[in-house]
Every structure is written in structure tokens, then in C-alpha cells.
Amino acid sequence: MDPLSALRDFTVRGELDNITLVGDEFRFADDYSFPCSTETAFRSKQGNLYTLETLLFFVRHHHLKHTEYLQSARFRRVPAVTLPDRKPLLDYLQGRIASSDSIELLPPTAMTAVANVDEYRPDDPSFLTGAGQSIASFPSYTVAGARGEGIAPDIVDYVSLIRALERPLKDRESLLECRNRDFYSVLMASTRREEERHRIESQQRKDGLVAKTRLFGSDDRGDEPGGYETPKPKMHLKGTKIGDGVPIILVPSAFQTLITIYNVKEFLEDGVFVSTDVKVKAMNGSSKPDCVTVQKKLSRDRAVAAYEVRDKPSALKPEDWDRVVAVFVLGKEWQFKDWPFKDHVEIFNKIIGFFVRFEDDSVESAKIVKQWNVKIISVSKNKRHQDRAAALEVWDRLEEFMRSRSHS
């Protein structure tokens, strides 16, 4: 008989008290003997087979509430039965149902008849060790057939006894419990960081207006006392002036492009390329920003202009298009649908274009882009130390473009 059927038989007959622990085995009266760690035929909904030790402890303590049962199992260091398995398992063991989908019968080699197991017999001198060691040294175990506290038989495998006492300190359920942990402080720290980020971006917008005036303002001196410079913005893009406010950089909203509104800040400010997928997962469900402010932080320039990065051209007002100075292209014509320009030739005469690709991508990926007036920027898939050079190349091209248009 397999361990599960034997346990069911003894449970239905109300003879659980006749199951005793001897060494690392459970003795079912004088009928059967199985190792404690034997896997039974009952499979958990989590996929593992319950051991005989787990099922015996459960059926003896099923009257407890599940939380109390779990605490008792952890105290005794016995793996526990999960909550979804409690009812079908108990119904089967107590005979209310004849079978279950969770039962997978094991081969008969998994069981051992008690007749093949030597018992402790005090009247047989061959079982005496001569050392006089008492079985009381192992109070958690009893030897079948022993009368009182006798002498331990020499067949006892002490290593097995020690290993039988070992139990996992943590299981799947206990790991999910976080006692004495307060996540309120984590939430508050995260909130403070988010507020600080918004404050810094707001300040960067203001600083960007000042830096833009310094970078593209007139070199003429005014008549104010002290010879202070009177800024006279005179920047034009082939007849189209830059509108008031922070210059705008457009990025695609499609995920198949390398640079998006999710990762543009790390790339341009820190010189590090992080994939959009990674950034989206890190946001943990937060909504996508409508606008991101970036500044060049990769050099020691004192006057640093700020730029707004957006990915919704359809949301731009007519006056906003006067502030658009650069675009990261997807390499598809439909990206420029409904733009206020005749074609891509006019677009890239008034706006500088960038196409970011992996350096080992096929030539076909940039076939259309090579027909446009667009600068191709290559980044490595794995060599992150090369990202800084790629980001600096974008800044150099952008600043050169801005200077040339300011004097046109």
C-alpha cells in the first residue's frame, strides 16, 4: 500500500494514534513503515508532492484555524499544507470523497513493509550496544516494541536522526510575511523624491530661459549704467523665428524607436542609454509624462540651455511649432503626418533631425533615413561606456545647428 492510501485508511478508522515515529520513519501499527520524507501521491496546486510528514501533521491539526496551523507547523519545522489544498485533501483523507484530481499514484517501490524493518528487542543481546547509551538521548523518537527506557539498538543511524530533526527555516509563505516592517516611510521617501524632482525641473525651465538669452542674445552693449548687456534675441530658422519660451525637441511615441520620452533624459543629461522597456517597468504603472525638461550636463559650459522634450506633435499649438528645433526620427514617413511643413525636405531644413540606431543593426534599418538630411547616431547594445560619446555628438550637432540658425 502506498503512503497516502495507508494514511487515509488509518484516518478513516480513527487510528492516527497508532502511527508512531521511529527514527526517521513512521510506523503504521504493525502494518507499514515509510520514511518521513516520502513523497505521497497528493500533488499541491503549487505543483509539488506533499510528503507523508506534512500530511500526517496536517490531518492531526486540521481542527486549527489556518493561521494557527501555519504557526504550529513553523514551530515544529514541518512544511505546511496550503489553504487551497486544505478542503480537498481533508475530504479525501477522511473518506468523504473516493478520489481527487490532485492524486497521482506512485510506484509500489516507494513503500516498505514493516516486516523488513528490525525492531528493538531488549531480550536479544545482539541488539545491545554495550555502551549503555539510553534512547532518552533522542526524546522525540520511540522504538516500536520497547518497554520503558531501554538501551538504544546498534542499528540506529544517528546521522539520520540528526537529519530528521532538520527543517527548513523559511518556506514560501513565511517569506511573503514581513513582520515588523513599515512601508509607510518608504512611501513618504518616494513622495518626497518625486516632489523634489518636480521642483528641480521647474527651476530648470526658468534657468533655461536665462541660458537661452545668454547663448543666443545680442553681443551689443546697451546704454545702461555699468555697461550691462541688453539681450536682443535674434535667432531665426530660415525665416522662421524661434518662439518665446524653451526650445522643443520632438521624439517618437512609438516603442520601436530607441529614444523615447521615457529614456531621453538619461541619454541626453547623463550620457547613459536605458531601454524604454526597462524605464516603463521601473515606473511601476505611473502615467507617461507629457513633457520632459533636459539640459546638457556632460560638459562644463556655464551657460546651459534647457529644452522641452515632447512626443505628441498633434498637441502643439501653431506658436509652439516656432520653438521646435530638433526631432528624433523613427525612419517612417508617417511620423510627419499633419506636420505644418510641405515635406521632409522642408522639415530638415528648419529642424535638425537625429536617428539613433544600434551600431550592429543592418543597413536596411537606416535605408530611408539616409535619404534625409538627418544625422545618424549609433549606440552599442552592451557597451554602456560608449553612450556618453553618442550623447555628446547629439549635443554638439544641436548646438552647432542653433548657432548657425541664430546668425541666419
Image (spheres, helix red, strand yellow):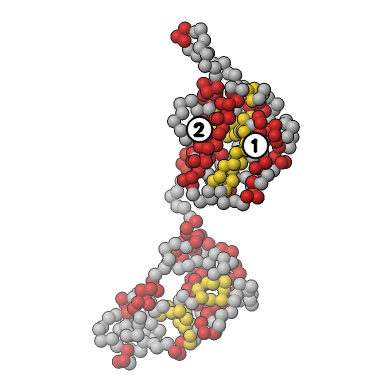
Residue at screen point 45% across, 90% down: 115
Alpha carbon separation for disc pair 1 and 2: 24 Å
In the depicted view, which residue is nearer to us: 103 or 196? 196
Residue pointed to by mark 2: 296
Residue 19 shows up from this direction: yes
Horizontal and vertical percent position of residue 80 = 50, 66
Look at the image and tell me in which quarter the C terminus lies: top right
Dot 1 alpha-carbon crowd within 10 angstroms: few under 14, some 14 to 19, many 20 or more: some
Residue 239 in the image: above or below residue 373? above
Residue at screen point 70% across, 40% down: 335
* Total marks placed: 2
Classify residue 106 by image quadrant: bottom right
Residue 190 shows up from this direction: no
In the depicted view, which residue is nearer to us: 407 or 143? 407
Q: Earlier in the sequence, mark 1 or mark 2?
A: 2
Q: Outermost residue toward the left?
A: 131
Horizontal and vertical percent position of residue 104 = 59, 76
Look at the image and tell me in which quarter the N terminus lies: bottom right
Residue 174 in the image: above or below residue 62? above
- Asked if the residue under mark 2 is in contact with the one under mark 1, i.e. CB atoms within 8 Å, the reply is no
Q: Secondary structure at mark 1?
A: loop
Determine which of the numbered discs, if any, sits on residue 395 in the image: none
Three-letter amino acid code at the position of disc 1: Asn
Residue at screen point 40% across, 74% down: 164
Three-letter amino acid code at the position of disc 2: Lys
Residue pointed to by mark 1: 373
Horizontal and vertical percent position of residue 198 = 53, 32
Residue 225 in the image: above or below residue 305? above
**Which label lies toward us, 1 or 2?**
1
Horizontal and vertical percent position of residue 227 = 47, 10
Is residue 397 shown left or right of residue 237?
A: left
